[in-house]
Image (cartoon, rainbow, N blue to C red):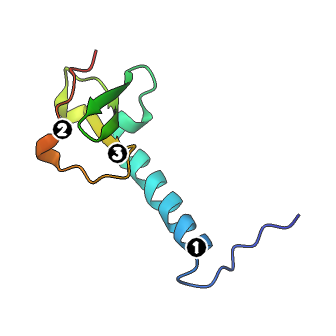
Amino acid sequence: AILSWNWPAGSVHAGLRTLYRELLSLRRTHPALRDFTHRFAALVPNDSGGLLHVVRGDPSQPKNCVHAVFNLTAQPVSAAQIVLPVAR
């Protein structure tokens, strides 16, 4: 198989390539995203189902820590509704 990088602008493949480029750029600029020793993930129950809370970096150093919350349900969830556990 031959991989083509000549995807038309606006196509799904071009969008994925842009997403990967941006994610790689984030990893280069945020040390917490390169830290594989301090990581935490937990399912957080809420009224509409569940959320996935992922932490990278050392939580005792907030400037070097990244939190991401993923909604695993079909229902929208506002940030005010999210209560996260303390990362270990």
Residue 13 vs 52, above or below: the answer is below
Q: Position of residue 47 (x, y in %)?
A: 23, 37
Q: Which numbered disc, 1 or 3, marks the residue closer to the eye?
A: 3
Secondary element type, mark 3: strand
Disc 1 marks a residue whose amino acid type is Val
The answer to whether the residues at label 1 and label 2 have Cβ atoms under 8 Å apart is no
Label 2 crowd bin: few (<14), some (14–19), many (20+), radius 10 Å: some
Identity of the residue drawn at 85% across and 67% down: 2
Secondary element type, mark 1: helix
Tell how many labels: 3
Q: Which numbered disc, 1 or 2, marks the residue closer to the eye?
A: 2
The answer to whether the residues at label 3 and label 2 have Cβ atoms under 8 Å apart is no
Q: Earlier in the sequence, mark 1 or mark 2?
A: 1
Q: Which mark is residue 12?
A: 1
Identity of the residue drawn at 22% across and 23% down: 85
Label 3 crowd bin: few (<14), some (14–19), many (20+), radius 10 Å: some
Disc 2 marks a residue whose amino acid type is Ile
Please tell me in which quadrant of the rendered image residue 3 appears: bottom right
Q: Position of residue 72 (x, y in %)?
A: 40, 43
* Spatial separation of the CA atoms under disc 1 and disc 2: 31 Å
Residue designated by label 2 = 82
Identity of the residue drawn at 30% across and 29% down: 44
Residue 48 vs 88, above or below: the answer is below
Residue designated by label 3 = 71
Q: Earlier in the sequence, mark 3 or mark 2?
A: 3
Secondary element type, mark 2: loop
Q: Residue furthest left?
A: 80
Residue 48 vs 10, above or below: the answer is above
Q: Earlier in the sequence, mark 1 or mark 3?
A: 1
Between 45 and 26, the one lying in front of the other is: 45
Q: Position of residue 66 (x, y in %)?
A: 28, 37
Residue 19 vs 70, above or below: the answer is below
